[in-house]
Amino acid sequence: MFTLLLLVVGFALLIKGADVLVEGASSLARRLHISPLVVGLTVVAFGTSAPELVVNIIANLQGESALAIGNIIGSNIANILLILGVAGMIRPLSVTRNTVWREIPFSLLAMLVLAALANDALIDGAGVSVLSRIDGLVLLAFFLVFLSYSFSKSKPVTTDLREERLPSVLRSTMYITLGILGLALGGKLVVDSATTIAIMLGLSQTFIGLTLVALGTSLPELATTIVAAHKRKTDIAIGNIVGSNIFNVFWILGLSAIIHPISYTMILNRDVGVAVLASVLLMSFVLGNGRSLQRGQGFVLVLFYIVYLVTLTLS
């Protein structure tokens, strides 16, 4: 009962944290005349990726590499198929030209780079595959390129602050901080509770990483994206997901690999392939609809995710 109570508390913190974070980020963007998309790609994405970062570092230091890398791959799959799918079913999501031709391809590149660096046995014929500290530095280098690109594309946005009752920069920053703390704590409570239940049921570490832990650490993205979509702030909704996927691979896996090399098993290539296919599917959907994700396409993404989970469970 206590574990279930912690699970409920975690969900409550996630929802409230997401609401506060979206409000703080959007008001800060208008105050500083920054594009909401850039805020979504950086500040919001970093905040909602905090649970993945915490879980990965702890799991990696404890030698649970399957949990660490499965968490990231599973989260990226859930972000596109489940979260954007659900958000698209709630309200059609408009996508900017830059997101279609630059941000989404960059998230696709992240998975391809991960596959290239991690498959030592497949590419080099090595006895084992591992994300080494050098690989971690390469991932972090890509992360710095992404951050530089995001800020270079930040264009001033004209906002008449006299017509809006916006919070001050300090108050908006406080909202963002409180939102991030709520998301991180809520995500941690949900993951710990779900993992405890899963272990009691005798599930494998890889399965836990790809499903329950991935879903648990993706809950901040789910909550933030749904709230942003409901409030018609689709730039933050899309930017949050794309930015989180890039953060997950380049920042979180890069930092984790530098702290401690991460073992990689060939079976994960199947899941990397699903993540790549999800990005390609998302791009094809938005390109075919005048840069927007429609409700029917959101349903297809969610259905694809359900099929993936069923296949993963039966394999």
Image: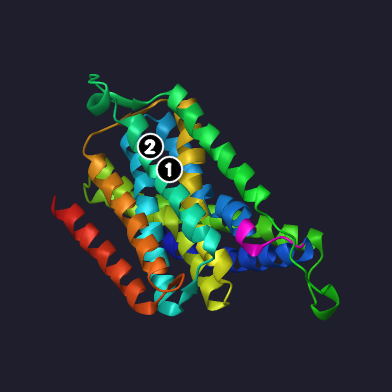
The front one of 38 and 182 is 38
- In the rendered image, residue 245, in percent from the top left (x then y), is placed at 45, 50
- Give the image quarter of residue 163: bottom right
- Give the image quarter of residue 129: top left
* Residue 111 shown left or right of residue 250 in the figure: left
**Residue 271 visible, this orientation:** yes
- Kindly state the secondary structure of the residue where label 1 is placed: helix
The residue at the point 59 percent across, 72 percent down is 233
Task: Kindly indicate whether the residue at mark 2 contacts the one at mark 1 (C-beta within 8 angstroms).
Answer: yes
Q: Mark 2 points at which residue?
A: 114
- In the rendered image, residue 159, in percent from the top left (x then y), is placed at 78, 71
Q: In this view, does 105 lie above or below 236?
A: above
The residue at the point 61 percent across, 52 percent down is 42
- In the rendered image, residue 167, in percent from the top left (x then y), is placed at 79, 69
Number of other residues with Cα within 10 Å of mark 2, as a class: few under 14, some 14 to 19, many 20 or more: many
* Residue 290 shown left or right of residue 160 in the figure: left
Which numbered tag is attached to residue 110? 1
Give the residue type that dot 2 points to. Leu
Q: What stretch is highlighted in magenta?
A: 33-38
Question: Is residue 185 part of the magenta span, yes or no?
Answer: no
Give the residue type that dot 1 points to. Ala
Q: In this view, does 306 lie above or below 69?
A: below
Which residue reaches farthest right? 162
Number of other residues with Cα within 10 Å of mark 1, as a class: few under 14, some 14 to 19, many 20 or more: many
- Give the image quarter of residue 27: bottom right
Question: Is residue 36 part of the magenta span, yes or no?
Answer: yes
Q: In this view, does 285 lie above or below 125?
A: below
**Residue 1 visible, this orientation:** no
